[in-house]
Structure formats: C-alpha cells, structure tokens
Image (tube, coloured by chain):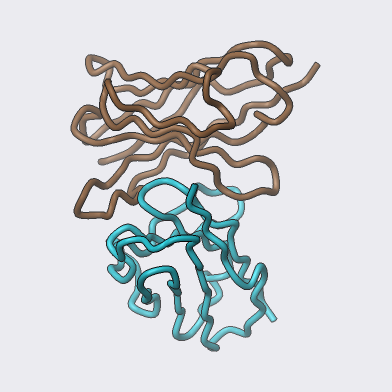
Chain colours: A cyan, B brown
Amino acid sequence: EIILTQSPDTLSVSPGERAALSCRVSQHIPSSYLAWYQQKPGQAPRLLIYGTSTRATGIPDRFSGSGSGTDFSLTISRVEPEDFAVYYCQQYGSTFGQGTRLEIK
Amino acid sequence: EVQLVESGGGLVQPGGSLRLACAASGFTVNSNYMAWVRQAPGKGLECISVLYSDDLIYYADSVKGRFTTSRDISKNTVFLQMNSLGAGDTAVYYCARGGGFNYGYAFDIWGQGTMVTLSS
C-alpha cells in the first residue's frame, strides 16, 4: 500500500506571504499521477493541480506544483484570504495524504 | 453543465444498510471512471471505491466485502450499496469523476456530498 505523508500538519502564514506544502510518497510514483486538492469548510474538495504541476481549469497561477519520485510540493506564491483551507495530495486517483491546514497567522 | 449530485444519505442503525446514488449530468458515467470518497467528521479524505469498469472495481480494505459499487447507464447514475454499517462508517460520502489518463486519473468533478450517520 502506498502511503502519502503531508507536512506540516498546519501551516500559519499571513496574507501575501509564500506557502510551501510538502507531500512525501512511500514509494516512487510517476509524476503524472500526483494531484493536489483544496477543501474549504462545508465544501467538497476541488482539484487544483494534476500531473504534479498542471493547474486545473480556473486555478490561478499563484498555485504551482513540483516534484518527482517520492517528494512533491505545492507552493502558493502570495497567499490570498480565500486560500486558507485544507490541502490534500493524492496519488493515481486513489490514496490521499492526511492533509495540511493552511491557517491565518 | 457537468455535475454530480449525490442522494440517499441519512440516519441508519448499526448493522443496517443504505444505498447512495450519484446522478451525473453533462457527461456519461460509462465514459469515465467513477469514485466514492468519504470524510469522517473532522477527518481527512478516504477513497473507498473506484469503478474502472464493470469488471474492475477497487475497494478499500475498510469497506471490502460490505460495500458494492455499480452503475446504471440508462439512468447515468452510479450507486454505492452499503451493508453491515458500523460507527466507523459515519461520514460525508462524495462521488467524484476520474479525469482519465490525461488528468493522471485525478478527480476533476465532485458532488456536493451526502451525510451518512450511524446511530442507535
């Protein structure tokens, strides 16, 4: 079973700052199979990034993804107020990480 | 408009059964693979089933042998039959569409979710 471990569990940043979220996979996966989702309270998750670095439709370019092998990351270049949410990574349309909560500092 | 609408959630006693439905519009459920993802209160996301084809369905260990995923092409709907329900099954259940090879099989469309609550 492939396990995804996200860090940190909670990230506190101020609006306008940069946020970097990490996702470590227990075994090598193709870059094409790593995705990121955003979930706000009371809402369904929303696809942000697929194939490690491709933004989904309508996702602003302050969101970027990178990585390969077992280490992947999601970066928000300048955090906007609407970005405070929980972020999940996922591999191959299956297992999710435990999530990183992005909160206001 | 491409969308998914879940229904069928509710309050159920331990050991009981429930069938969830996920009605699709704007695309056909037999041209995409479909998934069920659940989220227990205050917890993260758990992918519990993926319907790749009628002959190939993935189930998480936590639901294997108790839950069954199927689809009715004539109704453009996917179903999740849940039997032998227990307290650990209390969650919001989401239906999601797999975006296919070009999306790295990520889930590009999600329903709004339906709540299942176990209570005696």
The x and y percentages for residue B32 are 23, 36
Residue B25's image quarter?
A: top left
Name the residue: 25% across, 29% down: B29
Give residue B39's position: percent from left, percent from top: 60, 41
Residue A6: give x, y in percent of width and height.
Answer: 57, 66
Viewer-side residue, A52 vs B28: A52
Q: Nearer the viewer, residue A52 or B78?
A: A52
Image x and y of residue A54, in percent: 28, 68
A12 on left or right of B120: left
Question: In the rendered view, would you say A51 is above or below B57?
Answer: below
- Residue extending farthest top: B16
User: Residue drawn at (56%, 27%), measured in percent from left and top?
Assistant: B63
Quarter of the picture containing the C terminus of chain A is: bottom right
Asked if residue B81 lies left or right of residue A30, the reply is right
Vertical position of residue A56 compared to residue B25: above or below: below
Q: Is residue B4 above or below residue B110?
A: above
Q: Residue at x 53, y 74 (%)?
A: A21
In the displayed structure image, the side of residue A57 where residue A76 appears, left or right: right
Q: Residue at x 41, y 22 (%)?
A: B69
Task: Please say if A1 is above or below B54.
Answer: below
Disc tally is 0
Residue closer to the observer: B36 or A27: A27
